Amino acid sequence: MEWAIEAEGLGKRYERRQALGGVDLAVPPGTVLGLLGPNGAGKTTTVKMLATLLEPDSGRARVAGYDVVRQPAEVRRRIGLAGQYAAVDDMLTGRENLVLIGTLAHLGRRAARVRAAELLERFGLTGAAGRPARTYSGGMRRRLDLAACLVATPSVLFLDEPTTGLDPVSRSQLWDAVKELVTHGVTVLLTTQYLEEADILADRIAVIDTGRIIAEGTPEELKRRAGEERLEVSLTRPESLARAADALRGVAPGEPSVDPAGGTVSITLSDGMESIESAAAALRRADVTVADFALRRPTLDDVFISLTGKTA
């Protein structure tokens, strides 16, 4: 199987609104694809079609080697899906939730109990296994929801904004769980509005806007497209800003950017450390006292804004 997830020209229309206008994706096995986009861009619609919950109006898609329209049952046997809200039964205990799903997946009662115990241990929920899910914290419910997705040992996992509303500790715990799954060969398609999350987890990122993929690449590739690295120099005396700018003009291409309010001068770096060394030497020769050097790299926020014109 060359691709774990493959889509070509995927389209969907709701009455007068075109939700997707031809989405192409190709995700290798055992990797994470981060799907980023503004609200209403088509992220959840894409996930629902790949997970066989919606039928596309145009195009085709294969997940785990099977066509999502012609072979939906085969796709469902091989995927897990965690939506934006934890889909657990509040009246059941953590253990009962997982055993029920295992039974519905035809594992058999004994095998379902064994699998539930494995997952409760894996996600740090063994101590709370006998408590009703309604007593769980948000992070615990999310971990239980992810465990529920894994009862049937899927090869492809769809995570639609899985950490929305979680505190930093719970979010970090979920990230660790996803990383572990990928090391065991699971393919993950992750939609998120937390750009830090995509930066940490995703091998590749696809940016979707108004129903179309407008950019794709590794996080580093996309950052380079958003702009070059810049060296920001903070000065101890604001009156030396002009002298500092004159000294830095010969160090890098382009005009230095001066911020009188912040007392800083910044330049584009053309050759990394050599430019930094040249800048330091030029400032020393000009008798400019420096308070701080800071290397500013483009972030995924910069990428998102430059591509969509919106903040994440």
Image (tube, helix red, strand yellow):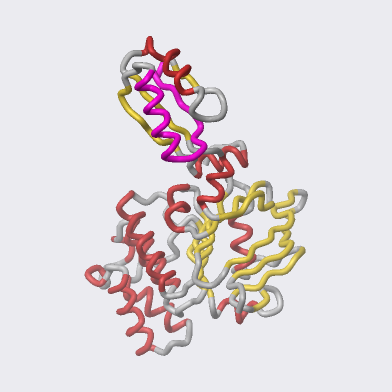
Q: With respect to residue 273, does 58 lie above or below?
A: below
Q: Residue at x 64, y 62 (%)?
A: 25
Residue 10 position within the rendered picture, expressed as x and y whole percent measured from the top left = 71, 62
Q: Residue at x 44, y 58 (%)?
A: 201
Which segment is the magenta one?
Answer: 261-285
Please check the rendered image and state whether residue 248 is part of the magenta-colored stretch, yes or no: no
**Toward the viewer: 206 or 211?**
206
Please check the rendered image and state whether residue 272 is part of the magenta-colored stretch, yes or no: yes
Residue 279 position within the rendered picture, expressed as x and y whole percent measured from the top left = 42, 28
Q: Residue at x 32, y 61 (%)?
A: 140
305 sits left or right of 237 in the view: right
- Image quadrant for the N terminus? bottom right
Furthest toward the top, the residue is 239
Residue 87 position within the rendered picture, expressed as x and y whole percent measured from the top left = 45, 64
126 sits left or right of 34 in the view: left
Residue 67 position within the rendered picture, expressed as x and y whole percent measured from the top left = 68, 76
Picture quarter containing residue 225? top right
Q: With respect to residue 272, does 140 lie above or below?
A: below
> How many numbered marks does the figure carry?
0
**Toward the viewer: 36 or 246?**
246
27 sits left or right of 152 in the view: right
Furthest toward the front, the residue is 285
**Toward the viewer: 39 or 213?**
213
Furthest toward the left, the residue is 127
Q: With respect to residue 244, does 186 lie above or below?
A: below
Q: Residue at x 76, y 63 (%)?
A: 57
Q: With respect to residue 131, does 12 lie above or below?
A: above
